[in-house]
Image (cartoon, helix red, strand yellow):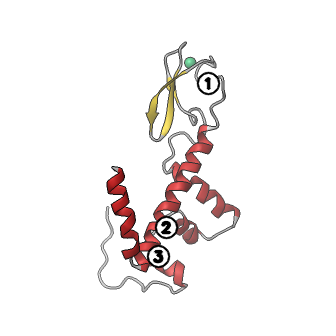
Amino acid sequence: MTNQSFQSWLSGLDRLSAAQWSQLQQAVQERSEGAAAVAAIELQIDTERRCPHCQAGGAVRRGTTRGLRRYSCKRCGKTFNALSGTALSGLHHKERWLALGRSLVERESVLRSAQRCSWVDGPAASAAATGVAPSPITGCVKARA
Ligand SMILES: [Zn+2]
C-alpha cells in the first residue's frame, strides 16, 4: 500500500460504524498476536542453526515456508524450520497458539476458547457471547457422508 493510499484509508477511520470499528480492532489484535506467536516459535532456532536431521551447525537461511523461516543444512542438504522434529511440526494456525495457550491456562470452555481463537462464529459464537443457547436444528437434516 502506498503512503497516500494508507493516509486515505486512515482518514476513513472516523466513518466506521461501531461494528466495523470492533472488527478492525479484532483484526489488528489477531495480527499482532499472530506475529508474537511466530516470533516465539522462531526463538527455538539456536544461534548455531543446528540441523535437526544430522545435528550439524551452520545452516543457512533459505526463505520462508508456511510463515516460518526456512533453513538449509550445509552437510545433509535437508531443509528445516523452528518446528522441524518437534511434535508441533505440521500443525496449522500457529498464529493462534498463544491465544489458545492463554485460553487453556484460564480454563475456558471449548466454545469460549474457540471464540477467543476466532475458530468459531455464527450462532455458536453468538451463544457464547450472550449466554443464550442457539435454537435447535429442526426439520429434515441430512448428514454428509
Ligand atoms: Zn543436516
The location of residue 139, given as percent across then percent down, is 31, 85
**Looking at the rendering, in which quadrant would you find the C terminus?**
bottom left
Q: SS of the residue at dot 1?
A: loop
- Residue tagged 2: 25
Rendered view: 63 above or below 11: above
Q: Is residue 122 visible?
A: no
The location of residue 41, given as percent across then percent down, is 60, 42
Horizontal side of 80 relative to 57 (left or right) equals left
Q: Residue at x 45, y 34 (%)?
A: 64
The location of residue 94, given as percent across then percent down, is 53, 49
Mark 3, residues whose alpha carbon is within 10 Å: few (<14), some, or many (≥20)?
Answer: some
Q: SS of the residue at dot 3?
A: helix
Rendered view: 119 above or below 68: below
Residue 143 image label: none
Disc 1 from disc 2: Cα separation? 37 Å
Q: Nearer the viewer, residue 123 or 137?
A: 123
For marks 2 and 3 on the same chain, the one whose residue lies earlier in the sequence: 2
Q: Nearer the viewer, residue 40 or 3?
A: 3
Write down which quadrant ligand 1 falls in: top right
Closer to the camera: disc 2 or disc 3? 2
Q: Nearer the viewer, residue 49 or 6?
A: 6
Indicate the quadrant where residue 113 lies: bottom right
Horizontal side of 90 relative to 42 (left or right) equals left
Three-letter residue code for mark 1: Arg
Disc 3 from disc 1: Cα separation? 44 Å
For marks 1 and 2 on the same chain, the one whose residue lies earlier in the sequence: 2
Residue 49 image label: 1
The location of residue 39, given as percent across then percent down, is 59, 43
- Residue tagged 3: 124
